[in-house]
Amino acid sequence: MSAITIKDVLKKAIEMEEAGKIFYEYAAAVTDNEDFRKIMSVLATEEVGHKHIFENMMHNVENINFSDEKNEYLQYLENYLTTKSVFDRKKFESQKYDIKNILDILDFAMDREQDSILYYMTLMTIVREEQSHLVQKIIEEERKHFIKLNKTKNLIKK
């Protein structure tokens, strides 16, 4: 197993945010519901902001290696996340046509937001203390995304 560095972890976070943006833009484009389109567009824009935060963090970190124990956990986490299609553009492109309606979009997005939260909670444990508040802010925003998606789902189901 090759050693994972903090820059590797931040690169993955950047990829996740890029993929989230692409997904939300796709979701906005395939619906006729104007309210839903607006929600998806806002989420896409917020993903871009998260990406910029991680890019700035990457420019300001030393490329340290992690202990074997932490490295093993990060390897597990990365393997777990690569099974999720929104974090892998090619896989998402092949699966997006299986999403047939707004409820499918919402379920898919909610699962991905939860996966993002898991990844970022791990990231919190490895970034410098002065950067942890930025990651915490993104975790809070991802939770808000989940809540927003869940509320939208509940409204649509009525």
Image (cartoon, grey):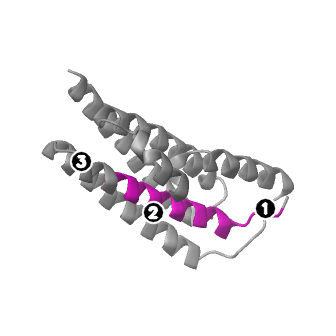
Q: Quadrant of the N terminus?
A: bottom right
Residue 66, which numbered label? Answer: 1
Labels 1, 3: front one? 3
User: In the rendered image of this protein, does residue 111 appear above or below residue 129?
Assistant: above
Q: Earlier in the sequence, mark 2 or mark 3?
A: 2
Q: Nearer the viewer, residue 137 or 151?
A: 151
Query: Can you name the residue that lies furthest to the bottom here?
Result: 59
Residue drawn at point x = 53 percent, y = 63 percent: 15
Say which residue appears at 26% left-offset and 48% top-offset: 30
The reply, left or right, for residue 66 in relation to residue 125 is: right
The residue at which mark 3 appears reads as: 39
Given contact means CB atoms under 8 Å apart, are the residues at marks 1 and 2 in contact?
A: no
Magenta-drawn segment: 2-24
Q: Is residue 11 magenta?
A: yes
Query: Label 2: few (<14), some or many (≥20) within 10 Å?
Result: some
- Percent of width and height locating residue 98: 42, 39
Q: Amino acid at mark 3?
A: Ile
* Residue plotted at (54% across, 64% down): 131
Label 3 secondary element: helix
